[in-house]
Amino acid sequence: MSSFLPLFIALLALTALALACYVWRAARLRRRISASARRQIRQSWEHAASLPDPVRRVLEAEKAADRLLAELGFRGSFAEKLTAAGVRLGDMEPVWRAHKLRNRLAHEPGATVGEKEAARALAAFGRLLAPFLGK
């Protein structure tokens, strides 16, 4: 039993170090956005959320998220930015689903979206934006 104690302590220390690195990285990313860029992204997000048409809401919400990722230094298409961001910005799976919905709406003629599906997409984009748009 006592031979596992050093291993347990080492694993605990590594976990604490990994968590500290994650928190430090997230804090550093937040500081990289200027106040004016933050304000513009917030206005873009509020505009998107206020649109009555669910299709336009999803399209415009992704634009706000894309602008945030660009401000954080990620380059390329929205999908390339999401890939580069990886898990550094949290669970990206809901954002990927929202992006796939956005692509369907943008590229399939006559594609529509229900209010619930649009709300899920906006919630995913909103969770991505929220840590960076704090007052």
Image: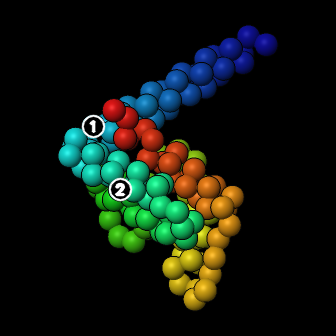
Q: Residue at x 35, y 56 (%)?
A: 44
Q: Is the residue 41 above or below the residue 130 in the image?
A: below
Where's residue 2, x and y in %? Answer: 73, 10
Task: Classify mark 2: residues with Cα within 10 Å, few (<14), some (14-19) or many (20+).
Answer: some
Residue 100 as seen in the image, left or right of residue 1: left
Quarter occupied by residue 104: bottom right
In the displayed orientation, state which residue is furthest to the front: 52
Does any portion of residue 76 appear in the rendered image? yes
Residue at 22% in and 41% down = 35
Q: Choose mark 1 or mark 2, whichever is in front.
A: 2
Q: Where is residue 57? Give x, y as percent.
A: 50, 63
Q: Three-letter amino acid code at disc 2?
A: Ser
Callout 1 crowding tier (Cα within 10 Å): few <14, some 14–19, many ≥20 = few
65 vs 10: above or below:
below
Identify the mark at residue 44; answer none if there is no mark. Answer: 2
- Quarter of image, res 105: bottom right
Q: Which residue is mark 1?
A: 31
Q: Which mark is residue 19?
A: none
Q: Quadrant of the C terminus?
A: top left
Mark 1 and mark 2: Cα distance apart in space: 20 Å
